Protein backbone atom coordinates (compact mmCIF):
# COMPACT_ATOMS: atom_id res chain seq x y z
CA UNK A 1 0.00 0.00 0.00
CA UNK A 2 1.40 3.33 -1.02
CA UNK A 3 1.15 6.47 1.03
CA UNK A 4 3.11 9.54 1.93
CA UNK A 5 3.77 11.42 5.13
CA UNK A 6 5.24 14.92 5.20
CA UNK A 7 7.55 15.22 2.18
CA UNK A 8 8.46 11.55 1.90
CA UNK A 9 6.78 8.92 -0.22
CA UNK A 10 6.22 5.61 1.50
CA UNK A 11 4.12 2.57 0.89
CA UNK A 12 2.83 0.33 3.64
CA UNK A 13 1.98 -3.28 3.17
CA UNK A 14 -0.25 -5.31 5.39
CA UNK A 15 0.65 -3.15 8.37
CA UNK A 16 0.90 -5.01 11.66
CA UNK A 17 -1.17 -3.98 14.68
CA UNK A 18 2.03 -2.62 16.24
CA UNK A 19 2.69 -0.22 13.37
CA UNK A 20 -1.00 0.42 12.78
CA UNK A 21 -1.45 1.60 16.35
CA UNK A 22 1.33 4.12 15.85
CA UNK A 23 -0.24 5.39 12.62
CA UNK A 24 -3.65 5.63 14.37
CA UNK A 25 -5.58 4.26 11.40
CA UNK A 26 -9.21 3.47 12.24
CA UNK A 27 -11.71 1.56 10.07
CA UNK A 28 -14.85 3.17 8.62
CA UNK A 29 -17.39 3.90 11.34
CA UNK A 30 -20.16 1.72 9.84
CA UNK A 31 -20.21 -1.86 8.52
CA UNK A 32 -19.66 -2.54 4.83
CA UNK A 33 -23.41 -2.93 4.10
CA UNK A 34 -24.13 0.58 5.35
CA UNK A 35 -22.24 2.13 2.42
CA UNK A 36 -23.21 2.30 -1.22
CA UNK A 37 -20.27 1.04 -3.31
CA UNK A 38 -18.92 3.49 -5.87
CA UNK A 39 -19.70 2.77 -9.56
CA UNK A 40 -17.74 -0.08 -11.13
CA UNK A 41 -15.12 0.67 -13.77
CA UNK A 42 -15.78 -0.22 -17.41
CA UNK A 43 -12.60 -1.87 -18.61
CA UNK A 44 -13.53 -1.35 -22.25
CA UNK A 45 -12.79 2.32 -21.54
CA UNK A 46 -9.08 3.11 -21.34
CA UNK A 47 -9.76 5.63 -18.58
CA UNK A 48 -10.35 2.63 -16.28
CA UNK A 49 -6.67 1.72 -16.68
CA UNK A 50 -3.77 3.50 -14.96
CA UNK A 51 -1.42 2.12 -17.62
CA UNK A 52 -2.35 1.05 -21.14
CA UNK A 53 -0.03 0.18 -24.05
CA UNK A 54 0.71 3.06 -26.39
CA UNK A 55 -0.68 5.67 -24.01
CA UNK A 56 2.00 7.75 -22.24
CA UNK A 57 2.10 7.33 -18.47
CA UNK A 58 4.45 7.79 -15.55
CA UNK A 59 5.26 4.09 -15.82
CA UNK A 60 7.32 5.00 -18.90
CA UNK A 61 10.18 6.48 -16.85
CA UNK A 62 13.64 4.91 -16.71
CA UNK A 63 15.75 6.05 -13.74
CA UNK A 64 19.25 7.37 -14.30
CA UNK A 65 21.83 4.62 -14.05
CA UNK A 66 19.57 1.97 -15.56
CA UNK A 67 20.89 0.69 -18.85
CA UNK A 68 18.08 -0.03 -21.26
CA UNK A 69 15.12 1.54 -22.97
CA UNK A 70 11.39 1.13 -23.31
CA UNK A 71 10.56 -2.20 -24.86
CA UNK A 72 9.88 -2.06 -28.57
CA UNK A 73 7.87 -4.86 -30.13
CA UNK A 74 7.64 -6.46 -26.67
CA UNK A 75 7.19 -10.23 -26.77
CA UNK A 76 5.22 -10.36 -23.51
CA UNK A 77 2.80 -8.36 -21.39
CA UNK A 78 2.62 -7.50 -17.71
CA UNK A 79 -0.66 -7.31 -15.80
CA UNK A 80 0.14 -5.19 -12.74
CA UNK A 81 -2.18 -4.89 -9.73
CA UNK A 82 -1.34 -1.77 -7.75
CA UNK A 83 -1.11 -1.44 -3.94
CA UNK A 84 -3.30 0.72 -1.72
CA UNK A 85 -3.17 4.46 -2.23
CA UNK A 86 -6.50 5.19 -0.48
CA UNK A 87 -5.91 6.08 3.16
CA UNK A 88 -9.07 7.68 4.47
CA UNK A 89 -11.67 5.85 6.52
CA UNK A 90 -14.67 7.56 4.90
CA UNK A 91 -15.73 4.28 3.29
CA UNK A 92 -14.49 0.73 2.76
CA UNK A 93 -13.76 1.04 -0.97
CA UNK A 94 -12.49 3.99 -2.98
CA UNK A 95 -13.76 5.17 -6.32
CA UNK A 96 -11.69 3.54 -9.04
CA UNK A 97 -10.81 6.98 -10.41
CA UNK A 98 -10.20 8.63 -7.03
CA UNK A 99 -8.22 11.81 -7.53
CA UNK A 100 -6.34 14.20 -5.27
CA UNK A 101 -3.91 12.56 -2.85
CA UNK A 102 -5.00 9.01 -3.72
CA UNK A 103 -4.50 9.54 -7.43
CA UNK A 104 -1.22 11.38 -7.02
CA UNK A 105 0.20 8.54 -4.97
CA UNK A 106 -0.73 6.10 -7.71
CA UNK A 107 0.73 8.22 -10.49
CA UNK A 108 3.87 9.65 -8.88
CA UNK A 109 4.49 6.81 -6.48
CA UNK A 110 3.40 3.40 -7.69
CA UNK A 111 3.72 3.88 -11.45
CA UNK A 112 7.20 5.39 -11.21
CA UNK A 113 8.64 3.18 -8.47
CA UNK A 114 7.03 -0.16 -9.23
CA UNK A 115 5.21 -0.51 -12.56
CA UNK A 116 8.03 1.16 -14.51
CA UNK A 117 10.30 -1.79 -13.69
CA UNK A 118 8.48 -3.74 -16.38
CA UNK A 119 8.73 -1.22 -19.22
CA UNK A 120 11.88 -2.91 -20.51
CA UNK A 121 10.28 -6.30 -21.08
CA UNK A 122 6.62 -5.89 -21.69
CA UNK A 123 3.52 -4.13 -22.86
CA UNK A 124 2.03 -2.83 -19.60
CA UNK A 125 -1.54 -3.15 -18.34
CA UNK A 126 -2.45 -1.78 -14.89
CA UNK A 127 -6.15 -1.54 -14.05
CA UNK A 128 -7.67 0.99 -11.71
CA UNK A 129 -10.03 -0.67 -9.26
CA UNK A 130 -12.20 0.08 -6.25
CA UNK A 131 -9.38 -0.54 -3.81
CA UNK A 132 -10.00 -1.31 -0.17
CA UNK A 133 -9.06 1.38 2.34
CA UNK A 134 -5.78 0.89 4.19
CA UNK A 135 -7.51 0.71 7.58
CA UNK A 136 -9.37 -2.47 6.55
CA UNK A 137 -6.08 -4.36 6.70
CA UNK A 138 -5.68 -3.42 10.36
CA UNK A 139 -9.15 -4.71 11.17
CA UNK A 140 -9.69 -8.06 9.43
CA UNK A 141 -13.25 -9.29 9.72
CA UNK A 142 -16.55 -9.50 7.89
CA UNK A 143 -16.65 -5.91 6.59
CA UNK A 144 -13.02 -5.96 5.54
CA UNK A 145 -13.44 -9.28 3.74
CA UNK A 146 -16.46 -7.93 1.84
CA UNK A 147 -14.42 -4.90 0.86
CA UNK A 148 -11.65 -7.19 -0.40
CA UNK A 149 -14.25 -9.11 -2.40
CA UNK A 150 -15.47 -5.94 -4.09
CA UNK A 151 -11.94 -4.84 -4.98
CA UNK A 152 -11.09 -8.31 -6.28
CA UNK A 153 -14.20 -8.41 -8.47
CA UNK A 154 -12.81 -5.42 -10.38
CA UNK A 155 -9.35 -6.98 -10.75
CA UNK A 156 -10.92 -10.19 -12.06
CA UNK A 157 -13.07 -8.32 -14.60
CA UNK A 158 -10.05 -6.31 -15.73
CA UNK A 159 -8.00 -9.46 -16.23
CA UNK A 160 -10.81 -11.16 -18.12
CA UNK A 161 -11.13 -8.09 -20.35
CA UNK A 162 -7.40 -8.22 -20.98
CA UNK A 163 -7.54 -11.94 -21.84
CA UNK A 164 -10.53 -11.62 -24.13
CA UNK A 165 -9.45 -8.50 -26.00
CA UNK A 166 -5.72 -7.86 -25.69
CA UNK A 167 -3.76 -10.99 -24.84
CA UNK A 168 -4.23 -12.88 -28.12
CA UNK A 169 -2.16 -15.81 -26.88
CA UNK A 170 0.82 -13.71 -25.73
CA UNK A 171 3.02 -14.63 -22.75
CA UNK A 172 2.31 -12.48 -19.71
CA UNK A 173 3.76 -11.63 -16.30
CA UNK A 174 1.48 -11.22 -13.29
CA UNK A 175 2.94 -8.59 -10.96
CA UNK A 176 1.60 -6.83 -7.88
CA UNK A 177 2.35 -5.35 -4.50
CA UNK A 178 0.70 -5.32 -1.07
CA UNK A 179 -3.12 -5.08 -1.40
CA UNK A 180 -2.61 -5.77 -5.09
CA UNK A 181 -0.85 -9.00 -4.14
CA UNK A 182 -3.81 -10.15 -2.05
CA UNK A 183 -5.97 -9.83 -5.17
CA UNK A 184 -3.27 -11.26 -7.44
CA UNK A 185 -2.95 -14.34 -5.22
CA UNK A 186 -6.65 -15.03 -5.62
CA UNK A 187 -6.53 -14.27 -9.35
CA UNK A 188 -3.62 -16.64 -9.77
CA UNK A 189 -5.46 -19.52 -8.11
CA UNK A 190 -9.00 -18.89 -9.35
CA UNK A 191 -8.40 -17.75 -12.91
CA UNK A 192 -4.87 -18.47 -14.14
CA UNK A 193 -3.95 -21.85 -12.66
CA UNK A 194 -7.50 -23.16 -13.12
CA UNK A 195 -7.31 -22.75 -16.92
CA UNK A 196 -4.58 -24.73 -18.68
CA UNK A 197 -4.66 -22.43 -21.72
CA UNK A 198 -4.06 -19.37 -19.55
CA UNK A 199 -1.57 -21.07 -17.25
CA UNK A 200 0.73 -22.04 -20.11
CA UNK A 201 1.11 -18.35 -21.04
CA UNK A 202 2.25 -17.29 -17.55
CA UNK A 203 5.93 -16.29 -17.59
CA UNK A 204 6.27 -15.64 -13.84
CA UNK A 205 4.22 -14.26 -10.96
CA UNK A 206 5.87 -11.48 -8.92
CA UNK A 207 3.37 -11.46 -6.03
CA UNK A 208 5.46 -9.12 -3.89
CA UNK A 209 4.73 -7.87 -0.40
CA UNK A 210 2.09 -10.51 0.23
CA UNK A 211 1.48 -12.44 3.42
CA UNK A 212 1.61 -15.58 1.33
CA UNK A 213 2.11 -18.93 3.10
CA UNK A 214 4.83 -21.18 1.71
CA UNK A 215 2.21 -23.81 0.90
CA UNK A 216 1.39 -21.86 -2.27
CA UNK A 217 3.18 -24.72 -4.04
CA UNK A 218 0.19 -26.90 -3.22
CA UNK A 219 -1.59 -25.15 -6.09
CA UNK A 220 0.83 -26.83 -8.47
CA UNK A 221 2.79 -23.66 -9.28
CA UNK A 222 6.39 -24.01 -8.05
CA UNK A 223 8.31 -21.34 -6.19
CA UNK A 224 11.06 -19.84 -8.36
CA UNK A 225 14.51 -21.23 -7.60
CA UNK A 226 16.65 -19.71 -10.36
CA UNK A 227 16.79 -16.44 -12.33
CA UNK A 228 15.48 -17.82 -15.64
CA UNK A 229 12.91 -20.31 -14.36
CA UNK A 230 9.45 -19.76 -15.85
CA UNK A 231 5.91 -20.54 -14.71
CA UNK A 232 6.84 -20.01 -11.08
CA UNK A 233 6.09 -17.57 -8.26
CA UNK A 234 8.10 -15.19 -6.09
CA UNK A 235 7.27 -13.11 -3.02
CA UNK A 236 9.31 -11.21 -0.46
CA UNK A 237 8.74 -8.79 2.43
CA UNK A 238 11.72 -6.57 3.24
CA UNK A 239 12.62 -5.92 6.88
CA UNK A 240 15.60 -5.49 9.13
CA UNK A 241 16.58 -8.43 11.31
CA UNK A 242 15.21 -6.72 14.45
CA UNK A 243 11.89 -5.49 13.06
CA UNK A 244 8.82 -5.69 15.28
CA UNK A 245 6.97 -6.65 12.08
CA UNK A 246 7.14 -10.20 13.41
CA UNK A 247 4.64 -9.10 16.06
CA UNK A 248 1.17 -9.56 14.64
CA UNK A 249 2.37 -11.45 11.56
CA UNK A 250 -0.17 -14.17 12.22
CA UNK A 251 -2.99 -11.62 11.91
CA UNK A 252 -2.09 -10.75 8.33
CA UNK A 253 -4.66 -11.82 5.75
CA UNK A 254 -4.26 -14.11 2.76
CA UNK A 255 -6.70 -15.87 0.44
CA UNK A 256 -6.41 -19.62 0.89
CA UNK A 257 -8.74 -22.61 0.63
CA UNK A 258 -11.29 -20.44 -1.15
CA UNK A 259 -11.66 -17.80 1.57
CA UNK A 260 -9.95 -14.89 3.30
CA UNK A 261 -8.19 -15.92 6.47
CA UNK A 262 -5.34 -14.89 8.71
CA UNK A 263 -1.98 -16.50 8.13
CA UNK A 264 -1.73 -17.80 11.68
CA UNK A 265 1.45 -19.73 12.40
CA UNK A 266 2.24 -20.59 8.79
CA UNK A 267 5.60 -19.41 7.43
CA UNK A 268 5.53 -16.73 4.75
CA UNK A 269 7.07 -17.32 1.36
CA UNK A 270 10.38 -15.56 0.70
CA UNK A 271 12.44 -15.56 -2.50
CA UNK A 272 15.59 -13.44 -2.56
CA UNK A 273 15.30 -10.85 -5.39
CA UNK A 274 19.09 -10.73 -5.81
CA UNK A 275 19.70 -14.48 -6.17
CA UNK A 276 16.18 -15.64 -7.11
CA UNK A 277 16.14 -18.57 -4.74
CA UNK A 278 15.24 -19.12 -1.07
CA UNK A 279 18.61 -19.97 0.43
CA UNK A 280 21.43 -17.85 -0.98
CA UNK A 281 22.77 -15.01 1.15
CA UNK A 282 23.69 -12.22 -1.26
CA UNK A 283 26.13 -9.38 -0.46
CA UNK A 284 25.36 -5.73 -1.16
CA UNK A 285 27.76 -5.84 -4.12
CA UNK A 286 25.18 -7.98 -5.94
CA UNK A 287 22.64 -5.16 -5.79
CA UNK A 288 23.25 -3.10 -8.94
CA UNK A 289 20.59 -0.47 -8.43
CA UNK A 290 18.23 0.68 -5.66
CA UNK A 291 15.96 3.64 -6.36
CA UNK A 292 15.94 6.33 -3.61
CA UNK A 293 12.73 8.03 -2.46
CA UNK A 294 11.89 11.53 -3.71
CA UNK A 295 8.84 13.71 -3.32
CA UNK A 296 5.88 13.79 -5.67
CA UNK A 297 6.67 15.73 -8.82
CA UNK A 298 10.43 15.57 -8.30
CA UNK A 299 12.51 13.91 -11.02
CA UNK A 300 13.56 10.35 -10.26
CA UNK A 301 17.13 10.20 -8.93
CA UNK A 302 19.93 7.95 -10.10
CA UNK A 303 19.85 4.41 -8.77
CA UNK A 304 22.42 3.62 -6.11
CA UNK A 305 24.56 0.48 -6.24
CA UNK A 306 25.46 -1.67 -3.26
CA UNK A 307 22.78 -0.30 -0.90
CA UNK A 308 21.95 -3.64 0.69
CA UNK A 309 22.34 -7.34 0.29
CA UNK A 310 19.54 -9.73 1.20
CA UNK A 311 18.75 -13.10 2.72
CA UNK A 312 15.56 -14.98 3.51
CA UNK A 313 15.08 -15.74 7.19
CA UNK A 314 11.90 -17.02 8.86
CA UNK A 315 9.80 -15.91 5.93
CA UNK A 316 11.21 -12.38 5.81
CA UNK A 317 13.68 -10.83 3.39
CA UNK A 318 16.31 -9.41 5.73
CA UNK A 319 18.05 -6.26 4.50
CA UNK A 320 20.77 -4.16 6.12
CA UNK A 321 21.52 -0.65 4.91
CA UNK A 322 24.70 0.93 6.34
CA UNK A 323 24.10 4.26 8.05
CA UNK A 324 26.20 6.04 5.40
CA UNK A 325 23.84 4.87 2.65
CA UNK A 326 20.48 5.40 4.35
CA UNK A 327 19.81 8.84 2.85
CA UNK A 328 17.00 8.41 0.38
CA UNK A 329 15.82 5.15 1.89
CA UNK A 330 14.13 6.39 5.07
CA UNK A 331 10.41 6.64 5.67
CA UNK A 332 8.08 6.33 8.67
CA UNK A 333 7.91 2.54 8.42
CA UNK A 334 11.67 2.07 8.45
CA UNK A 335 11.55 3.37 12.03
CA UNK A 336 9.89 0.03 12.80
CA UNK A 337 12.37 -1.94 10.72
CA UNK A 338 9.94 -2.42 7.83
CA UNK A 339 11.19 -1.76 4.29
CA UNK A 340 8.05 -3.12 2.74
CA UNK A 341 7.36 0.25 1.16
CA UNK A 342 10.58 -0.30 -0.82
CA UNK A 343 10.13 -3.97 -1.69
CA UNK A 344 10.53 -3.23 -5.40
CA UNK A 345 12.65 -0.09 -5.37
CA UNK A 346 15.43 -1.49 -3.15
CA UNK A 347 16.00 -4.09 -5.88
CA UNK A 348 14.89 -2.03 -8.88
CA UNK A 349 17.72 -2.98 -11.26
CA UNK A 350 17.66 -6.65 -10.27
CA UNK A 351 13.91 -7.09 -10.77
CA UNK A 352 14.02 -5.21 -14.07
CA UNK A 353 16.82 -7.42 -15.42
CA UNK A 354 15.10 -10.53 -14.13
CA UNK A 355 11.80 -9.75 -15.84
CA UNK A 356 13.67 -9.31 -19.14
CA UNK A 357 15.59 -12.56 -18.58
CA UNK A 358 12.47 -14.61 -17.79
CA UNK A 359 10.64 -13.27 -20.84
CA UNK A 360 13.65 -14.21 -22.93
CA UNK A 361 13.73 -17.69 -21.39
CA UNK A 362 10.03 -18.09 -22.18
CA UNK A 363 10.17 -16.82 -25.76
CA UNK A 364 13.60 -18.19 -26.66
CA UNK A 365 13.92 -21.50 -24.81
CA UNK A 366 17.30 -23.21 -24.77
CA UNK A 367 17.73 -25.95 -27.41
Image (cartoon, helix red, strand yellow):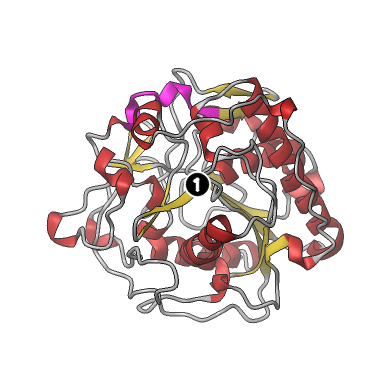
Q: Nearer the viewer, residue 257 or 126?
A: 126
Bin the neighbour count of mark 1 within 10 Å (Cα to Cα): few under 14, some 14-19, many 20 and up: many
Q: Position of residue 358 (x, y in %)?
A: 55, 61
Q: Is residue 364 left or right of residue 20?
A: right
Residue extent of the magenta highlight: 245-253
Furthest residue toward left: 324
Q: Residue at x 15, y 54 (%)?
A: 322
Residue at figure coordinates x 40%, y 77% from the top left: 299
- Camera sees residue 366: no
Quadrant assignment for the C terminus: bottom right
Q: Is residue 291 left or right of residue 32?
A: left
Image quarter for residue 115? bottom right
What residue is pinned by disc 1?
A: 1
Percent position of residue 318, x then y: 29, 42
Q: Residue furthest top?
A: 265
Observer-nearest of 294 and 314 = 294
Q: Secondary structure at mark 1?
A: loop
Query: Residue 273's x, y, as percent?
Result: 40, 52
Residue 164 in sight here: yes
Position of residue 303 measured from the top left corner of the image (x, y, whole percent): 33, 71
Q: Is residue 203 left or right of residue 349?
A: right
From the viewer's perspective, is residue 168 above or below residue 147?
A: below
Task: Tell whether position 4 is magenta.
Answer: no
| For residue 106, above or below residue 22 | below
Count of numbered badges drawn on the protein? 1
Residue at image position (71%, 40%) is 152
Amino acid sequence: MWFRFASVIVCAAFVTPVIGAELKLKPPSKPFEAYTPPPAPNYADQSAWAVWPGRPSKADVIPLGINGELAKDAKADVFFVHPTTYLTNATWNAKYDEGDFTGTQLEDGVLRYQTSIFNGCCRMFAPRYRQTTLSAFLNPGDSAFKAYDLAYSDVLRAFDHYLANENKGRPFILASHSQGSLHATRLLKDRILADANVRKRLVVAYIVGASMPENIESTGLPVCNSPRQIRCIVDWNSTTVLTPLALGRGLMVTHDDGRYQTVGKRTWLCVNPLSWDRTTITPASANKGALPIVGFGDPLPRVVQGVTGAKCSRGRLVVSIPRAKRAGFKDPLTTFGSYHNQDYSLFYASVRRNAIARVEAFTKPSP
